[in-house]
Image (cartoon, rainbow, N blue to C red):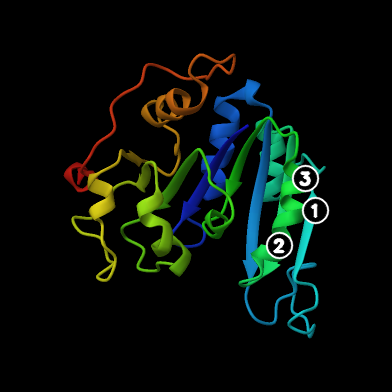
């Protein structure tokens, strides 16, 4: 089983879209797609709505998606061709309690693509790909913690001359591939080939794509 974890330093940055494009690019991989959402104080894991449940109540929920209408993120995974789609919801900081159930659901899965940073506390992926937007000042603690664990970085274009994160070191980006992408296409040929070479070279999992182009080591050079 190959495991890809897609992270991001903030919300609504394109993690789901990248997962969708990966699923679509490797149709023979029989993907199980997993979205992990951690809710803050006062939001219940059962339904994502306001709740007066106690701290130790409703710590997590795990549902399998069956609706292929494309109306939700987990539904989009199915539309893209995922064999299965799971949504894991936990209270903030309680992901550990959900992991036994997650592992049980993943037993027998051929290949897994998962949206999360915090899951790196519990799983060692074959590829960790954080999505970065240099123009967005928010930077989650979980993304900061694992930034140097990335196998490659996916940077939204056009990146500004300098990121807006004064307290985040970008030294790890100098040591690993950096793929500058546009929001309408988060999986360019170069990144698709990188994934194929790391996970599927020599296997029967073929990718849909064109001839690759090299990654850039310096995303700011494209400004």
Distance from Cα at disc 2 to Cα at disc 1: 9 Å
Distance from Cα at disc 1 to Cα at disc 3: 10 Å
SS for callout 2: strand
Identify the residue at horizontal 51%, vertical 57% (top origin): 117
Query: In this rendering, would 131 be left or right of 107?
Result: left
Query: In this rendering, would 223 be left or right of 202?
Result: left
Bin the neighbour count of mark 2 within 10 Å (Cα to Cα): few under 14, some 14-19, many 20 and up: many
Mark earlier in primary sequence (1, 3): 1
Instruction: Tell me if I can see residue 29 in this picture.
Output: yes
Name which quarter of the figure residue 116 lies in. bottom right
Q: Nearer the viewer, mark 2 or mark 3?
A: 3
Against 34, residue 209 (above or below) is above
Bin the neighbour count of mark 1 within 10 Å (Cα to Cα): few under 14, some 14-19, many 20 and up: few
Whole-percent x, y for residue 61 in the image: 78, 62
Residue, disc 2: 89
Identify the residue at horizontal 43%, vertical 50% (top origin): 130
Residue, disc 1: 63
Whole-percent x, y for residue 4 in the image: 54, 40
Mark earlier in primary sequence (2, 1): 1
Identify the residue at horizontal 69%, vertical 33% (top origin): 82
Mark earlier in primary sequence (2, 3): 2
**Numbered badge on residue 105:** 3
SS for callout 1: strand
Do the CB atoms of the residues marked 2 and 1 lie less than 8 Å apart? yes
Distance from Cα at disc 2 to Cα at disc 3: 14 Å
Instruction: Tell me if I can see residue 70 in this picture.
Output: no
Whole-percent x, y for residue 154 in the image: 38, 44
Identify the residue at horizontal 26%, vertical 57% (top origin): 170
Q: Nearer the viewer, residue 95 or 70?
A: 95
Bin the neighbour count of mark 3 within 10 Å (Cα to Cα): few under 14, some 14-19, many 20 and up: some
């Amino acid at each position: 089983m190959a495991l890809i974890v897609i992270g991001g330093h903030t919300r609504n940055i394109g993690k789901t879209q990248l997962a969708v494009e990966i699923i679509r690019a490797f149709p023979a991989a029989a993907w199980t797609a997993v979205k992990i959402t951690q809710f803050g104080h006062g939001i219940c894991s059962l339904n994502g709505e306001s709740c007066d449940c106690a701290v130790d109540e409703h710590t997590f929920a795990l549902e399998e998606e069956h609706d292929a209408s494309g109306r939700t993120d987990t539904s989009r995974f199915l539309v893209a061709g995922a064999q299965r789609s799971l949504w894991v919801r936990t209270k903030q900081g309680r992901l550990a309690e959900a992991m036994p159930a997650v592992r049980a659901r993943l037993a027998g899965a051929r290949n897994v693509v998962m949206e999360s940073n915090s899951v790196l506390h519990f799983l060692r992926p074959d590829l960790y790909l954080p999505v970065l937007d240099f123009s967005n000042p928010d930077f989650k603690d979980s993304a900061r913690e694992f930034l140097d664990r990335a196998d490659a970085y996916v940077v939204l274009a056009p990146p500004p001359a300098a990121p807006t994160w004064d307290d985040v070191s970008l030294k790890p980006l100098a040591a690993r591939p950096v793929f500058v992408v546009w929001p309408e296409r988060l999986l360019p040929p170069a990144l698709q080939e990188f994934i194929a070479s790391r996970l599927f070279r020599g296997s029967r999992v073929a990718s849909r794509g064109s001839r690759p182009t090299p990654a850039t080591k310096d995303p700011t050079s494209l400004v």
